[in-house]
């Protein structure tokens, strides 16, 4: 149950025929994002998604290469601090901060703080063809041999119908 005057991050996934949900009284909409149709090999696969919940631990002072993901996802920083450059917009994030990465085509660079551990959890909505696979996609070939500066722990993944 949502409480009045609480702080919430609402993330709604709508199809093209759906109407937007109303924001409950007492809450403020922080962001609305209409997720594009997922890539699938068939119409049925385009209506399905793989929901994945995982933790990402960045190495101290690490900078990720310019990248994107195969689907969109909500992230919440749980340790350290992170400078996120998302399509040229810089955000300084601290524990408890949430952000949305839209996925394919949106360029992301993350810079972890030095001297402390930096970690976040994320819920990804991926096309079913990415089920069980890495969602990370490098955007520049020059970065291909560079190792990714993070460790991942997958907690849950399941196929759902949107």
Image (cartoon, helix red, strand yellow):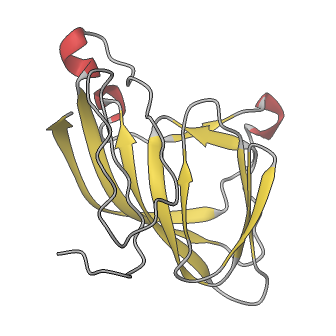
**Residue at (38%, 53%) from the top-left corner?**
11
Question: Farthest front residue?
Answer: 25
Quadrant housing residue 23: bottom left
Tally the marks. 0
**Residue at (39%, 69%) from the top-left corner?**
27
Residue 151 image offset from top left, x and y in percent: 53, 65
Q: Name the foreground residue: 68 vs 141.
A: 68
Quadrant housing residue 116: bottom right
Residue 101 image offset from top left, x and y in percent: 56, 48
Q: Quadrant of the C terminus?
A: top left
Residue 83 image offset from top left, x and y in percent: 75, 68
**Residue at (24%, 75%) from the top-left corner?**
2
Q: Is residue 21 above or below residue 90?
A: above
Q: Is residue 1 left or right of residue 25?
A: left
Q: Is residue 143 left or right of residue 50?
A: right
Q: Name the foreground residue: 128 vs 83.
A: 83
Question: Farthest top residue?
Answer: 42
Q: Quadrant of the N terminus?
A: bottom left
Quadrant housing residue 18: top left
Residue 130 image offset from top left, x and y in percent: 36, 33
Q: Name the foreground residue: 94 vs 142.
A: 94
Q: Name the foreground residue: 95 vs 63.
A: 95
**Residue at (56%, 75%) from the top-left corner?**
97
């Amino acid at each position: 149950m949502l409480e009045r005057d609480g702080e919430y991050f609402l993330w709604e996934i709508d199809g093209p025929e759906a109407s937007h949900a109303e924001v409950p009284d007492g809450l403020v909409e922080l962001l609305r994002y209409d997720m594009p149709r997922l890539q699938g090999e068939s119409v049925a696969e385009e209506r399905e998604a793989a929901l994945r919940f995982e933790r990402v631990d960045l190495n101290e002072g690490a900078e990720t290469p310019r990248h994107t993901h195969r689907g969109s996802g909500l992230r919440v920083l749980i340790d350290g601090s992170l400078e996120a450059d998302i399509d040229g917009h810089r955000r300084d994030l601290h524990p408890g901060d949430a952000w949305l990465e839209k996925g394919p085509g949106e360029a992301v660079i993350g810079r972890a703080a030095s001297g402390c551990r930096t970690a976040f959890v994320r819920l990804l909505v991926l096309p079913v063809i990415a089920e069980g696979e890495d969602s990370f996609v490098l955007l520049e070939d020059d970065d291909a041999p560079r190792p990714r500066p993070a460790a991942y722990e997958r907690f849950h993944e399941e196929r759902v119908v949107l």
